[in-house]
């Protein structure tokens, strides 16, 4: 609008701006102003949606167990839980439990498993290493390796918003984005 006023103040009095041109410029300014108002409204609505998600997430997630992409196990009350996503059916699935230094300390033989998500529990009552254990999945069909994704189970302790993104604080894995949660158990 300042530009339009400056143009009017500095126009040649012998050759004034055409009415049609002036109307066109005013319409363009109104369009830009309208777009800015729409952007401001959408930004406000996005912030309100995030706040509502955090409130709803707090009520529905705190205290729940979730699966996240990780091969680090959280030991709680002598038990560690994890999971996996198998890309295809497997004749044999084995989970090696590893110390923080990478030493195999236990092996779970889960046998044949179908494609999809599966969970497991490991008795960690005798686990005495400093730090969290991890695990490695070996899934095969015959001589072929079946693709797998490691999933760690953890408990949600709080839900918050950071820069418009909802994040979840986990007991053993720290803060992760809400979108990193693969399943709620």
Image: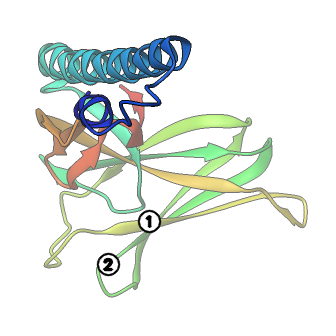
Gap in Å between the C-alphas at discs 1 and 2? 9 Å
Quarter of the image holding residue 74?
Answer: bottom left
Q: Quick one: SS at disc 1?
A: strand
Between residue 17 and residue 166, name the one nearer to us: 17
The residue that mark 2 highlights is: 99
Percent across and percent down for residue 147 are: 73, 56
Residue at 35% in and 35% down: 11
The residue that mark 1 highlights is: 135
Between residue 111 and residue 6, name the one nearer to us: 6
Query: Label 2 neighbourhood size at 10 Å, few (<14), some (14-19), many (20+)?
Result: some
Percent across and percent down for residue 50 are: 22, 23
Percent across and percent down for residue 95 are: 53, 60
Quarter of the image holding residue 162?
Answer: top left
Q: Quick one: SS at disc 2?
A: loop
- Residue 16's place in the image compared with 158, above or below, is above
Residue at 15% in and 20% down: 51
């Amino acid at each position: 609008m300042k530009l339009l006023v400056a143009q009017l103040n500095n126009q040649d009095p012998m050759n004034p701006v055409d009415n049609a041109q002036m109307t066109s410029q005013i319409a363009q300014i109104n369009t830009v102003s309208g777009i800015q108002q729409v952007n401001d409204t959408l930004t406000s609505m996005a912030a309100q949606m995030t706040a509502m998600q955090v409130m709803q997430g707090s009520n529905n997630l705190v205290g729940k167990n979730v699966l996240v992409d990780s091969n680090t196990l959280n030991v709680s009350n002598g038990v560690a839980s994890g999971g996996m996503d198998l890309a295809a059916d497997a004749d044999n699935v084995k989970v090696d439990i590893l110390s923080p230094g990478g030493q195999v300390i236990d092996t779970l033989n889960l046998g044949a498993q179908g494609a999809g998500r599966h969970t497991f529990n490991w008795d960690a009552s005798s686990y005495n290493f400093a730090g969290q254990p991890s695990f490695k999945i070996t899934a095969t069909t015959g001589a072929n390796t079946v693709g797998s994704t490691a999933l760690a189970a953890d408990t949600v302790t709080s839900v918050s918003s950071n820069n418009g993104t909802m994040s979840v604080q986990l007991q053993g894995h720290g803060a992760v984005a809400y979108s990193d949660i693969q399943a709620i158990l």
